[in-house]
Amino acid sequence: MDLSEFPSLSRDTLRDIRLTVDSGFKDFTRTYGETLELMLEPVKDFLIFLEGLLIDSPWFIVLAVLVGIVFLLSRNIKITIGSVIALCLIGTFGMWEDTMRTIAMVTVCTLLAIVLGIPIGIFMARSDRVQGFVNPILDLMQTMPSFVYLIPVVMIFGLGKVPGLIAIVVYAIPPMIRLTNLGIRLVDPDVLEAADAFGSSSWQKLVNVQLPLALPTIMAGINQTIMMALAMVVVAALIGVKGLGQPVVNAIANQYFTMGVMNGLAIVAIAIIFDRATQAYGKRLQKHSEVVHG
């Protein structure tokens, strides 16, 4: 017996395990793949609508709306002017359409992450048992190599927008869940006792006390979700998701240095705009919360 080799299952046994799991997943795909596609059809339609709206509308209107949203979130002239310059440079270098596709994808993925992540975070905050069950799953989602997410979604949905959208959401949703849970758990117990003293129900406490006080932390979760969604854009391009990721993948394949750097910088610019705007909004929420409950 060779003591330098770790004792492991035989090759035949490992092959049988792999074949069993693979065939089981393929059967699942054949049985439920079409149903899952139909369930996600409204999300796909919304993504196509938003993408078409951003691309087909006059660029100056889209620019004005995007900059207006940045200003409303940040209330900061420097961030707003920086956003105008960055978006104008993106358009000047011929990356406007790809950027709009990326913004549409990130927007839909972030909305999905919010809709799914906040309720899960609330359940975790209300139950230590639920938190103990969900935390290992979130650890797995955050540490699993992002390329691995692509395998099951491609097997079920093929190539295109939907598998890319699912892979991005799976990769980006953990911060949304974790920070929602954290924000609610950090609410001052004295405030909750005061709410109990006024006869608030569990639902009233959640809606009127816990969520408003947790909002700055939840906003930080949204910020991190956006950043992770943008980080996943290039990986999602491998399965047919159009946007700034595809030119980067093409640049790697064909060794086009300039194309890769320009599209990479465009992703960075979008990330900085989103990051600064949402961070500024989160700080405003925090100040407001301190003033009201200070």
Image (cartoon, rainbow, N blue to C red):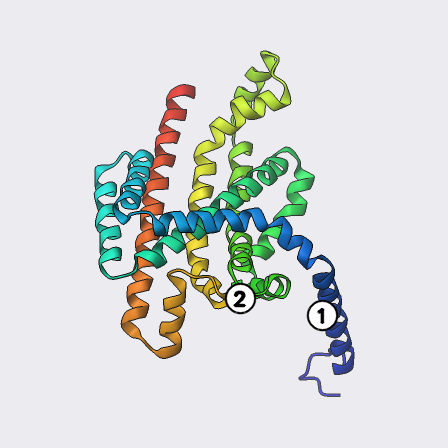
Q: Is residue 168 left or right of residue 286?
A: right
Q: Residues within 10 Å of mark 2 (few under 14, many from 20)?
A: few
User: CB under 8 Å between callouts 1 and 2?
Assistant: no
Residue lying at 52% horizontally and 20% vertically, measured from the top left: 191
Residue 293 in the image: above or below residue 67:
above
Q: Nearer the viewer, residue 258 or 121?
A: 258
* Numbered label attached to residue 147: 2
Circle 1 — which element? helix
Q: Residues within 10 Å of mark 1 (few under 14, many from 20)?
A: few
Residue 210 in the image: above or below residue 10:
above
* Numbered label attached to residue 22: 1
Residue lying at 39% horizontally and 30% vertically, measured from the top left: 286
Q: Marks 1/2: CA distance?
A: 17 Å
Type of amino acid at the residue the image marks with label 1 = Asp
Q: Position of residue 230 (x, y in %)?
A: 42, 55
Q: Position of residue 182 (x, y in %)?
A: 53, 38
User: Looking at the rendering, which quadrant does residue 73 occupy?
Assistant: top left
Circle 2 — which element? helix
Type of amino acid at the residue the image marks with label 2 = Phe
Instruction: For residue 136, say whether it is visible.
Output: no
Q: Report the quarter where the N terminus lies.
A: bottom right
Q: Position of residue 157 (x, y in %)?
A: 60, 61
